[in-house]
Amino acid sequence: MSKQAITYLQENRDALLNKLNEFLSIPSVSTDSVHKQDIADAASFLETYLTDIGFSGVQQIDTGGHPLVFAEYNEAGLDAPTVLFYGHYDVQPVDPIDEWDSDPFRPEVREGRLYARGASDDKGQVFMHLAVFEAFMRTEGYLPVNVKVCIEGEEEIGSENLYRVLHEQQDLFKADFTVISDSGMVAKNQPTILYGLKGFTGLEVTVDGPDHDIHSGLYGGAVRNPLMALSHILASMKDVDEIVTVDGFYDHVEPLSEEGRRLIQDVPGEDYQETLNIPETASEKGYTPKEHTMGRPTLEVNGMYGGYQGEGTKTIIPASATAKLTCRLVPGQDPEQIQQLLEDHIHKAAPSGVSVHVKKENLSAKAYKVSPDHPLIKKAAESYTEAFGKETVYVRMGGSIPVVEWLDAIYGAPIVLMGFGTPDDRLHSPNESFPLDSFDQGMETLAHYWTKVSQN
Amino acid sequence: MSKQAITYLQENRDALLNKLNEFLSIPSVSTDSVHKQDIADAASFLETYLTDIGFSGVQQIDTGGHPLVFAEYNEAGLDAPTVLFYGHYDVQPVDPIDEWDSDPFRPEVREGRLYARGASDDKGQVFMHLAVFEAFMRTEGYLPVNVKVCIEGEEEIGSENLYRVLHEQQDLFKADFTVISDSGMVAKNQPTILYGLKGFTGLEVTVDGPDHDIHSGLYGGAVRNPLMALSHILASMKDVDEIVTVDGFYDHVEPLSEEGRRLIQDVPGEDYQETLNIPETASEKGYTPKEHTMGRPTLEVNGMYGGYQGEGTKTIIPASATAKLTCRLVPGQDPEQIQQLLEDHIHKAAPSGVSVHVKKENLSAKAYKVSPDHPLIKKAAESYTEAFGKETVYVRMGGSIPVVEWLDAIYGAPIVLMGFGTPDDRLHSPNESFPLDSFDQGMETLAHYWTKVSQN
């Protein structure tokens, strides 16, 4: 049953890649309001494509922010299960733009990889699903499963509106299980299923000093320097052993069991030092880099700025300094509580002479875990192995997909995280790309999976 | 003798202000290469004006960087002293531009103040000197003193080329004493002579981590965060008591005597808390804000950046982080030695897992002091008092004028620092301005001074 669909995908590969390139050429950056029209264009692209495939009820749902694209397919019969397919069509910003070797919105194939913002995260993987649906419809004339499609435009900015829509329209999105392809494999051609994701929380801290930038000669010695004050605050939050020194941060962390450590050790990992070109790795004392990224919480400064950033010197004390912070959380940690602990710590650590303002980011998620033994997970693993010719590994990862937590909380139905990215994809970075091998074998995996799932 | 000149200045005030506005309208920002033509225009403006006044040997000296404008007047007679007048026609950058209430290069008078970049530092004060020379020439037909004019275009970027030119052409700039108006009065209408200036040194530190911005979920826990590493380094350099914690930093500092402290206390100071709109002042433990700004060394972060600075959140670990640091030094401290101590400290404080690069800024100066009892200083004080109707105060200040140290080292001749700015001028900041009172009374002060000095 999946064979004809796979043949279709092979025979129509060029046309499908052209269509994907069209999708990737739309700069649907969700965080920057300048891209409002591009977001609309990307949503329209999906609406048209889903209609062409033969989905019904295709619509853009007004979320109050960027639209959510919804569609249904109900012809697989009452015995067939209903799957909710979730993905996102928005992408991360592209800066620093001068570090891209080609235009992020003019897809280019180099050495077997497709380079473009969103090629891996998540437009490329969303497209693979739609192409597989197309293949079944064009060859068999129907899909093996009933499908609800939910592709949002605000994943990269926290999916805040989706959260509301999901809660308000619980019936619309209700399904027997969910499939998401917004993650990667631990190595190229290494089938990987995520059975755990980290949670997430974040905030922005601004330290205000004098009400304008002032001359460092005339005023140095009379005022607190906001950049120095912010450095003191940040340095007080994590020590050089990479241990977060915020009171209570680890209080409810579910400890890594010996078994958990062994599972992590078994996962083929990347050589961080080589991949990232760093002098050496740095991890929480007592844990390996793999253990820390997969199984322990983190606190990172994502951006910081204040004062003069131009060429040469400007002898000022800046009026203010700002840092953006995010945490990745593990099972046991409550995002809102952690956010509050961070805020309390920041205010306590702030020196005199400055005003400190904390802006809590409106995006947070609990960590998520599913049993690797669930039949829907096992079938996914088998499908991977058939397409890639290799045993599937089960991993917990450091990334966060807030919608996973929400769907889990609302429906309690299994969520199958089948990702096809690779560690070299440079997600969120310049020169994001996706290997064409993964594109082909990933679609084959999906074709197998829908067939297996329908043969319940 | 000065009376006619002063009358001329009063009667021609509008024309002179128009001419000053023309000068201020040229965006001669020295640190940014985009303003190369503006720098050339500002130098040409001065060349033309000096020629019109009647100076001889007017020329632009090629410094290898921005040109230096030189001119001479030798008709005051052999008995008359020769003064070197130094100033600068370059200005600081204008960012953040959106904090200006009017275009920084379209001078505008509001409530008795002239608003423009350079109105106070230093184009406005340079212009006052030229206007006074014009006034003497147009009324008396000659100047009371022989004059060498030296107006450079690189003061705001460290005067590096001037340093070389001064050393290579010592005869050209040789004079009996130097007058500089590139400073301010401690309060509006409070005649002030600087008898001490701080020295200066600086550097830029860059912390490099992964070779591109990376996903904080996938890699958080495996790598050192460059922004966090830089925060640790900076926090280790100055504590919350505002004491610089770099080994050896205070080793050769000339201590503030009880007399020195008393002199500082006698100076009418500004209310920092109110002027700068800060919750409270912050100074080195054991010293008042005035004592610290005037008599103790400082270390400031002038700018810092790394990672995402845009709207919203971007969940990355940045590839690198950069901070610009400068120190203001007091008598006894050697700039090169301090720069080396800072660099050594930074490398020692750097955590593992990152590469740290220090770029020493090519601009440094020792601190400078002159006796308040020198006759040339006393005459300046009397001139101020005649023009402003108030006793002159003598102060040490936190600002640095590198050329002062160099002229002192080369010639050993007295340097008279007669500034007319006020604490509200917002030097180096948005909305720089200069009070028109100071413009009028300052020119009157100079007219008195040249007359007094010629009556040796």
Image: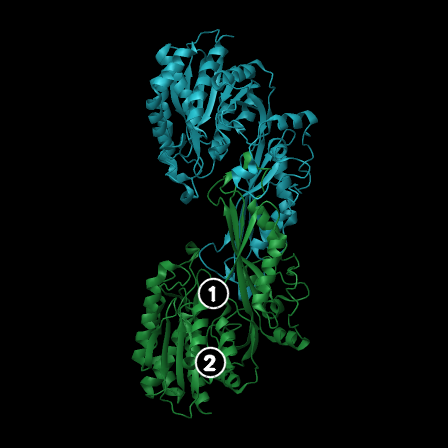
Chain colours: A cyan, B green
Disc number lying in front (2 or 1): 2
When the figure is inspected, residue A350 is found, relative to residue A23, above or below; the finding is: below
Where does residue B234 sit, x and y in percent of width and height?
Answer: 60, 54
Query: Residue drawn 61% across and 43% down?
Result: A343
What is the C-alpha distance between the residues marked 2 and 1? 23 Å
Q: Chain of mark 1?
A: B
Query: Residue drawn 36% across and 23% down?
Result: A47
Q: Secondary structure at mark 1?
A: loop
Q: Are marks 2 and 1 in contact (CB under 8 Å)?
A: no
Of residues B304 and A288, which is closer to you in this image? A288
Of residues A432 and A231, which is closer to you in this image? A432
Residue A56 appearing in the image: no
Could you say which disc has been placed on residue B427 in the image? 1
Query: Residue drawn 41% across and 9% down?
Result: A75
Q: Chain of mark 2?
A: B
Where does residue B227 sit, x and y in percent of width and height?
Answer: 56, 47
Where does residue A331 sit, x and y in percent of width and height?
Answer: 63, 28
When the figure is inspected, residue A201 is found, relative to residue B2, above or below; the finding is: above
The quadrant where residue A254 appears = top right
Q: Is residue B60 left or right of residue B413?
A: left
Q: Is residue B17 left or right of residue A167?
A: left
The quadrant where residue B199 appears = bottom right
Residue B318 appearing in the image: yes
Amino acid at the residue labelled 1: Leu
Where does residue B66 sit, x and y in percent of width and height?
Answer: 38, 67
Q: Secondary structure at mark 2?
A: strand
Amino acid at the residue labelled 2: Thr
Q: Which quarter of the rendering shows the N terminus of chain A?
A: top left
Could you say which disc has been placed on residue B178 in the image? 2
